[in-house]
């Protein structure tokens, strides 16, 4: 099961007089990842190398370092930590000593890896979206019980008889929600997938 971060985290390291600062943050889209990188990059640094992964989409940049020596190792650290919906930026201030391609890969990947290891993580749960129409009589009880099923109320639309609820819940809890709805409404509330 993949993980994301609860919040931003940082890690600092000096390797052969070069300073490395790794910054990681949770993101939900490519645009959010690029905005984080643009906001956190240091214009006075030698290199701002980064990688991000959101689902099946990913990008990385070596920012002037030899090809494959920075961005790809940062992405490998993200995938190695089983992270998703994460962006990592590693900023380098050159210290005057050449590290070589292998040394750069170890430095960038290692800084990203240590930053992600120190971060507080949260498990990403795949959720199914569904909809049901609930009468006013059952609405309060249903909403009170959604937390037990790890269900999120995404949208609520009221009408004369009650409310249509759009929910997102872990796939494993779908049958439990169907059973709860049948129990509180004596089989009148029907749940359908979106």
Image: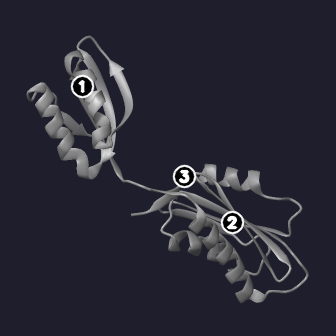
Q: Position of residue 128 (x, y in %)?
A: 31, 47
Tags 3 and 2 in contact by the CB under 8 Å rule? no
Give the mark nearest the N terminus, 1 or 3.
Answer: 3
Secondary structure beneath label 1: helix
Alpha-carbon span between mark 3 and mark 2: 19 Å
Image-quadrant location for residue 108: bottom right
Name the residue at 80% across, 86% down. 99
Q: Is residue 15 above or below residue 78?
A: below
Disc sitting over residue 87 in the figure: none
Secondary structure beneath label 3: loop
Give the mark nearest the N terminus, 3 or 2.
Answer: 3
Residue count near mark 2 (Cα–Cα under 10 Å), binned few <14, some 14–19, many ≥20? many
Whether residue 151 is visible, yes or no, is yes
Name the residue at 59% across, 65% down. 118
Using residue 117 as the reference point, say whether residue 55 is left or right of it. Answer: left
Residue, disc 2: 50
Rendered-image quadrant of the C terminus: top left
Front disc: 2 or 1 = 1
Name the residue at 63% across, 71% down. 114
Residue count near mark 1 (Cα–Cα under 10 Å), binned few <14, some 14–19, many ≥20? few
Q: Position of residue 53 (x, y in %)?
A: 55, 62
Disc sitting over residue 141 in the figure: 1
Closer to the camera, 4 or 167? 4
Give the mark nearest the N terminus, 2 or 1.
Answer: 2
Using residue 112 as the reference point, say whether residue 175 is left or right of it. Answer: left
Residue, disc 3: 6
């Amino acid at each position: 099961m993949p993980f994301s971060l609860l919040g931003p985290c940082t890690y600092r390291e000096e390797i052969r007089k070069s300073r490395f600062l790794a910054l990681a943050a949770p993101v939900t889209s490519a645009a959010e990842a690029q905005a984080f990188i643009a906001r956190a990059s240091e214009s006075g640094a030698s290199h701002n190398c980064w990688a991000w992964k959101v689902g099946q989409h990913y990008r990385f940049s070596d920012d002037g370092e030899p090809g494959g020596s920075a961005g790809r190792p940062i992405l490998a650290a993200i995938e190695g930590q089983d992270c998703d919906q994460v962006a990592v930026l590693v900023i380098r201030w050159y210290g005057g000593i050449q590290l070589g391609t292998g040394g750069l890969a170890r430095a960038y990947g290692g800084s990203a890896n240590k930053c992600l290891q120190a971060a507080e993580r949260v498990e990403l749960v795949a959720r199914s979206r569904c909809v049901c129409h609930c009468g006013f009589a059952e609405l309060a009880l249903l909403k009170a019980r959604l937390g037990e099923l790890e269900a999120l109320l995404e949208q609520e639309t009221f009408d004369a008889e009650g409310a249509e609820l759009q929910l997102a819940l872990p796939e494993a809890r779908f049958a439990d929600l169907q059973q709860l709805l049948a129990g509180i409404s004596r089989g009148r509330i029907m749940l359908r997938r979106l």
